[in-house]
Amino acid sequence: MPVISVDDWYHFYHMLNSHTKVAVDFTASWCGPCRQMSPIFSDLSSEHRDVLFLSVDIDNVRDVAQAYGISSLPTFKFFYGGREYQTVVGANRSGLEYGIESL
C-alpha cells in the first residue's frame, strides 16, 4: 500500500479511524533527515500491507502536528485501533522498523 499524504485534519482523522494499524510520518520538505527517511518509510509500506502509512507535512497540516505535539522531525507515530501506541523521533531506521513490526 502506498504512503498517503494527509491534506487536512478531517482526512487524517478519517484515515486514522478507518484502519486498525496506522504508521504516521510527521515531516517537512525542508528537513534533511526527513528526506533521508522518506524512501525507507515508503519501502516499509510495501512490506507491511496490513498497516496504513500516512505522511503529514507539518507546514501544510499544522493543526494535526500541533494536536500531537510534534516538536522534532522526523517524528513517527504508531496507532492501533485509533489510539496512539508508540513514538519514534529522529532518523532512526531500526526504531521505525520496530514500531511498525510491533503493531
Image: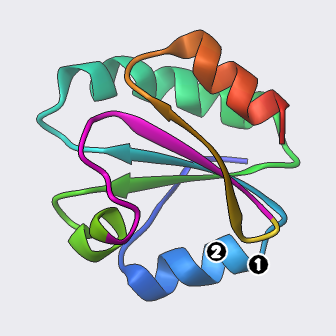
According to the image, label 2 marks what residue?
15
The span from disc 2 to disc 1 (Cα, nearest Å) is 5 Å
Query: Where in the figure is residue 38, as x and y percent of width and height?
Result: 43, 29
Q: Which mark is residue 94?
A: none
Secondary structure under the numbered disc 1 in the rendered image: loop
Q: Is residue 27 left or right of residue 43?
A: left
Q: Residues within 10 Å of mark 1 (few under 14, many from 20)?
A: few
Percent position of residue 93, x then y = 55, 13
Which residue is label 1 attached to?
18
- Amino acid type, callout 2: Met
Q: Residues within 10 Å of mark 2 (few under 14, many from 20)?
A: some
List the single residue furthest toward the left.
30
> Quick check: 55 above or below 27?
below
| Position of the C terminus by quadrant | top right
**Occupied quadrant, residue 63:** bottom left
Q: Which residue occupies 34% across, 33% down? A: 74
Q: Is residue 10 above or below residue 94?
A: below
- State how the image is colored: rainbow
Please report the residue visible at 16 percent of the width from the left and 59 percent of the height from the top.
Answer: 59
Q: Residue at x 76, y 78 (%)?
A: 18
What amino acid is at disc 1?
A: Ser
Point out the stretch of residues depicted in magenta: 67-80
Classify mark 2: helix, strand or loop: helix
Q: Is residue 91 left or right of residue 51?
A: left
User: What x and y, as percent, mark residue 52?
Assistant: 71, 55
Badges 2 and 1: C-beta atoms under 8 Å apart? yes
Decide which of 69, 16 is in the foreground and name it: 69
Residue 98 in which image quadrant: top right
Q: Residue at the location (41% across, 38% down)? A: 75
Left or right: residue 49 versus residue 89 is right
Instruction: Please identify the residue farthest to the bottom as the structure is shown.
Output: 10
Would you say 97 lies left or right of 55 here? right
